[in-house]
Amino acid sequence: MGLRLGDVAPNFKAQTTAGEIDFYEYLGNSWGILFSHPADYTPVCTTELGKTALLKDEFSKRNVKVLAVSVDQLDRHAGWVNDINETQNVQVDFPLIADGDRNVSTLYDMIHPNASATATVRSLFVIGPDKLVKLIITYPASTGRNFNEVLRVVESLQLTANYSVATPADWNHGEDVIVVPAVSTEDAIQKFPKGVKVVKPYLRYTPQPNL
Ligand code: BEZ
């Protein structure tokens, strides 16, 4: 069975464009994003890796390390990274795993045989500093992911890990958040000195607490 939210993200060693990596050592105490690509020298993947490189400062601001997976070999990765840098006007400086033996793809269930027998789908895992899986998204090969959405979710995950809040639909940085149902309104008023707006007993908002 594939991984589920809350599972321990399995560790692995892999050859990458930055040399051999032990996944847990690479992550250290950071958050991590492990994401797969159907193949090197493909157009959608080229834009996805370019976008990830472009958002480098946003990922590091949030203490997130990224690691890409593709089932091609290292020599192909090197040439493709040159193309990404050239066409997307970036400098890819995160590692790409050369997963020719499909070790990582299999460990993370990134090959969905009814979609493709050999290529990975677009899987993305967000892993917390505790090495538990916090988010799983799966897109088909034909649809590039929205990396601003990935950043938005990371911000929500980091916020909700530290405060008794949840984020509403379409929430963005700076907007009000929801007090979790486990906290009584009386306790919420103590916990959130910026104020609690009670719309219904189960629907209570407070300003984003970490600003
Ligand atoms: C791509 O990455 O561009 C791609 C890969 C497989 C099918 C369609 C697009």
Image (cartoon, rainbow, N blue to C red):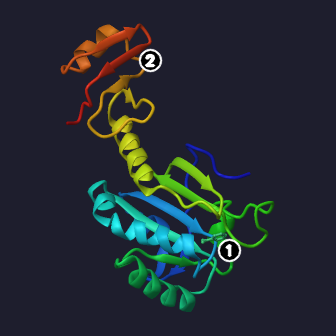
Numbered badge on residue 56: none
Quadrant hosting ligand 1: bottom right
Element at label 1: loop
Q: Residue at x 30, y 61 (%)?
A: 60
Q: Residue at x 43, y 45 (%)?
A: 153
Residue 6 seen in render: yes
For disc 1, the neighbor class at 10 Å (few under 14, some 14 to 19, many from 20) is many
Q: Tell me if residue 115 comes above or below residue 167 in the rendering.
A: below
Amino acid residing under circle 2: Pro
Front in this rendered view, residue 201 or 87? 87
Q: Quadrant of residue 6?
A: top right
Q: Quadrant of residue 147?
A: bottom left
Query: Which image quarter is the C terminus in?
Result: top left
Distance from Cα at disc 1 to Cα at disc 2? 42 Å
For disc 2, the neighbor class at 10 Å (few under 14, some 14 to 19, many from 20) is some
| Percent x, y of residue 144 | 55, 61
Element at label 2: loop
Q: Residue at x 19, y 21 (%)?
A: 194
Amino acid residing under circle 1: Arg
Q: Residue at x 64, y 63 (%)?
A: 142
| Percent x, y of residue 35 | 53, 63
According to the image, label 2 marks what residue?
A: 181
| Percent x, y of residue 163 | 32, 31
Is the CB atom of the residue marked by disc 2 within 8 angstroms of ligand 1's nearest atom? no
According to the image, label 1 marks what residue?
A: 102
| Percent x, y of residue 151 | 39, 51
Q: Compare marks 1 and 2 and give the one earlier in the sequence.
A: 1
Residue 128 seen in render: no
